[in-house]
Amino acid sequence: MSALRRGLKEHAESAVGDLTRRQIMAAVDKIAKTGKRGAAKDLRKHTHTFLEWCVGEGYVDHNVLAGYREPKETRAQRILRRTKGRALSDDEIIKVWQASGKLGTFGLLARMCLLGGPRRSEPTMIEWSKHVMDDRITFDATWTKMGLHHDLPRTHLVDEVLAAAKHFQRATSDYVFPSPKTGGQMSGFTKMVNRLVKEASVAKFTMHDLRRSLRTIMSRCGYDNEIQRLCVGQRPSGIDQVYNHDEQWIIRKMAFEAAHDYIAELVGAKRVGKIVRLQRTNPLDPIKAELLGRLREHYAAEGS
């Protein structure tokens, strides 16, 4: 609804049944021309979903976006999409971490995005009483993009961020990272990220690049893509998302701890445990190899 209010504000006084496909797509195109391709796609998607709901509830007879297909991407557009986004270098992580310490609650939220890999809106909804537990911080499935619950273990770096966040607690709000202006849910990321980029003196990046940076660090520490996806709340690949419901908390906790030790070494924070650098195999592989060896021995014994 937030996307609809922003994108279709010119038609806010119109009845839902009066909206035309041309009006909606003009609003989508207007956003796309500003370079916000993701926001444009979100507006089209959420408008389609809203209109389908209106049809189901009987407010309109049909969905004016029904049957619409996005034009096929050109080769140039595909290349641009593949190169979009980046992971911060080690030197940039140091500068961003140091600069974020000067930016209050937003700076702490940026650190949490680097440590946990959530989407930028997810930490804004964390509440002390509901989501901060003794051993983890939990992100509810009800407000994650993919509808998947995921957790962030309470490592030494996470605890440092939480301890700093307590200095910004509001009597009227239970949010861990309240808005510095209203005390409610934080918003207005574009201006705040620009300020962080300027303060850190690094090349422009987005909040989503912090998510990419964490996954890149986990890869350097030897954790494969499947574990990385689980850690940051992305859908498992293929049919696994239907049949495999194991949260693999232990291995995810290990991945976070290794990544946080890596970051701690960079920023000069207190270190806990041994940092694993460039270990190109999953730590569970020796266990898998041992189990396969036992199976081979078992079948060999049966054959004899």
Image (tube, rainbow, N blue to C red):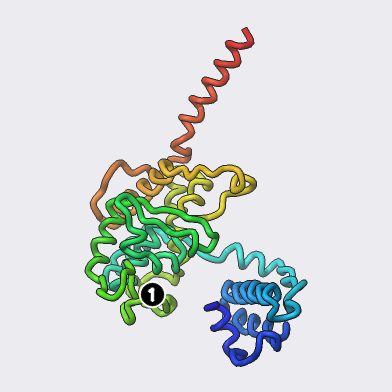
Residue 292 coordinates in the image, percent (x, y): 54, 25
Give the mark count: 1
- Is residue 186 shown above or below 287? below
Task: Give the residue pinned by disc 1.
Answer: 186
**Secondary-structure class at tag 1:** loop
Image quadrant in which the C terminus is located: top right
Q: Residue at x 50, y 30 (%)?
A: 288
Viewer-proximal residue among 70 and 84: 70
Residue 246 coordinates in the image, percent (x, y): 51, 42
Residue 142 coordinates in the image, percent (x, y): 49, 62
Q: Residue at x 50, y 44 (%)?
A: 224
Q: Residue furthest toward the top?
A: 304
Q: Residue 265, can we see it?
A: no
Q: With 253 as the anchor, is 55 left or right in this view?
A: right
Q: Residue furthest toward the front?
A: 58
Q: With 171 as the anchor, is 96 left or right in this view?
A: right
- Badge 1, how many Cα within 10 Å: few under 14, some, many 20+? many
Image quadrant in which the N terminus is located: bottom right
Q: Residue 219, can we see it?
A: yes
- Residue type indicated by callout 1: Met
- Is residue 164 shown above or below 52? above
Write down the quadrant of residue 9 in the picture.
bottom right
